[in-house]
Image: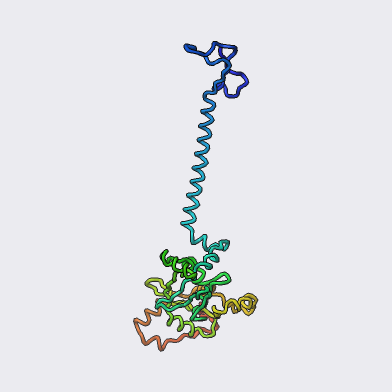
Amino acid sequence: MWKKKQNDSDESGIRIPEGPGPQHGAGSDGPPQGGVYVESARKKARHQIVFTAVLVIALFAGMTAYFCHYAVANRRTLFDNDYNSRDALLEQHNRRGKILAAGGETLAESDENNNRSYPYGNTFCHVVGYSILGGSGIEEYMKYELLHSDIPFASKLECDRNEELYPGNDVYTTLDVELQEYCYEELGENRGAVLVTEPSTGKILSMASKPDYDPNAIAGLWEYFRNDTSGQAPLVNRATQGLYPPGSTFKIVDAVELLQEDPSAFNNFSFNCEDGTFEIGEDSIHCF
């Protein structure tokens, strides 16, 4: 007679004979004497191991796919992260690309040793910015494009053979050099900014700000700017970082209507706003 082993946790798989049974041979239906059958326990264990292995592999594959997708989809965000030092590594192999105006004039360029220069100096200092000490302007915003090189593989082999840096990608802007110089000169010594756009497309044609600085000498002036307490803040681009109250934009519509009805009225029109306030009865209107 056969019975289940009482103290075995797996009652369905392991059985032992109660006593000596018949010898195993031809025509014998019983198990071999003293034999131990491990039937479903091993099969169940194998299934569990296989399931666990497949699950772990699937999880790792899913995480790998997600990380790869995230890195590709957010490559620029990751590149611009302050904790990412890849830009410094790229500058060891790639020469930072040029920044060009709408007419093809060079606003920023690098020599063979990756030393940056700015041909127009102070005129474009805020909008073009600088590439060192954290960077600013177009130099910082477009550094992903400037530091990557999309030249053909054969050209890279040629650069390697000549021990030259890979030329980075150039960035073309919509800035107009003549208009920028005009706005810069008209600002004079005043603190403020001039921004000129093309309304139909939104293109920025000019962005001038003062006080200014020489981006070619930014490294030597950095400590002076950091410790400056005069309030001039020459590093601040007042066109994008200045805080100003909004102007009366609807006055432009009124002015256009006046010029269309009577073009000569503009030359004879004047208005005196004493103390910056215009009084109408009990109401006061500020003249700004």
| Position of residue 21 measured from the top left corner of the image (x, y, whole percent) | 56, 11
Is 223 rendered above or below residue 53? below
In this picture the colour scheme is: rainbow
- Residue at 37%, 72% (x, y): give it: 200
| Position of residue 17 measured from the top left corner of the image (x, y, whole percent) | 58, 15
Farthest residue to the front: give it: 161
Observer-nearest of 91 and 205: 91
Question: Residue 2 appears in which quarter of the rendering?
Answer: top right
- Residue at 49%, 65% (x, y): give it: 144
Question: Residue 152 appears in which quarter of the rendering?
Answer: bottom left
Observer-nearest of 246 and 286: 246
- Residue at 53%, 34% (x, y): give it: 49
| Position of residue 157 measured from the top left corner of the image (x, y, whole percent) | 44, 65
Observer-nearest of 251 and 224: 224
Quadrant position of the N terminus in the picture: top right
Is 147 rendered above or below residue 287? above
Farthest residue to the bottom: give it: 268
Question: In the rendered image, is residue 244 in sight?
Answer: no
Is 88 rendered above or below residue 29? below
Farthest residue to the left: give it: 261
Question: In the rendered image, is residue 202 in sight?
Answer: yes
How many numbered tags mark residues here? 0
| Position of residue 236 measured from the top left corner of the image (x, y, whole percent) | 56, 75
- Residue at 45%, 86% (x, y): give it: 270
Question: Residue 268 appears in which quarter of the rendering?
Answer: bottom left
Is 261 rendered above or below residue 33? below
